[in-house]
Amino acid sequence: MTIDEAQAIIDKTKTVYTAGVDRMYDGLTLIKKYHDGISYAVGHDQIWCGVGFEKSVSKMSVKDVRAMAEMGWFESEGSWSRFV
């Protein structure tokens, strides 16, 4: 999958921001399914996954990209990101 294909899925998917911690954790678990040894950065109200967005989505299924979007994950600064 390309970045543009993944971004189109994210843009079209309705996001539910309730149950924030569970959805954040589920997203991190889903990213870990595709990558080992991932680092994370957390700012005031946002988390970023240390693996590159393009590298990540190139391995992910449409179903998993859609699940990430439904959980509130999106692309920011070249990484998967989510408001916490």
Image (cartoon, rainbow, N blue to C red):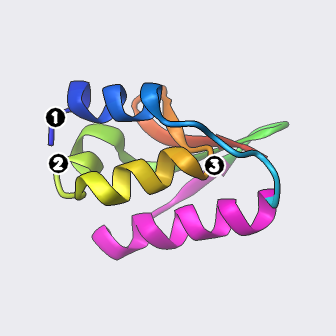
Observer-nearest residue: 32 or 40?
A: 32
Residue at point 67%, 62% (across, down): 23
Q: Mark 3 points at which residue?
A: 41
In terms of secondary structure, where does tag 1 sit? Answer: loop
Q: Mark 1 points at which residue?
A: 2
Residue 4 location, quadrant: top left
Residue 36 shows up from this direction: no
Residue at point 29%, 69% (across, down): 34
Mark 2 neighbour density, 10 Å: few (under 14) some (14–19) many (20 or more): some
Looking at the picture, does residue 5 appear above or below residue 68? Answer: above
Q: In this rendering, which labeled residue sits more in front, label 3 or label 1?
A: 1
Tell me: 18 left or right of 79.
Answer: right
Q: Which residue range is magenta in the image?
A: 20-41
In terms of secondary structure, where does tag 3 sit? Answer: strand
Q: Earlier in the sequence, mark 2 or mark 1?
A: 1
Marks 2 and 1 close (CB-CB < 8 Å): yes
Tell me: 14 left or right of 50.
Answer: right
| Residue type indicated by callout 2 | Ser
Residue 9 shows up from this direction: yes
| Residue type indicated by callout 1 | Thr
Cα–Cα gap, marks 3 and 2: 22 Å
Q: Residue 49's x, y, as percent?
A: 51, 51
Q: Residue 48's x, y, as percent?
A: 58, 44
Question: Total marks drawn?
Answer: 3
Residue at point 56%, 41% (across, down): 81
Q: Residue 74's x, y, as percent?
A: 51, 36
Q: Residue 58's x, y, as percent?
A: 17, 48
Q: Mark 2 points at which residue?
A: 58
Residue at point 35%, 28% (across, down): 7
Mark 3 neighbour density, 10 Å: few (under 14) some (14–19) many (20 or more): few
Looking at the picture, does residue 25 appear above or below residue 20? Answer: below
Residue 52 location, quadrant: top left
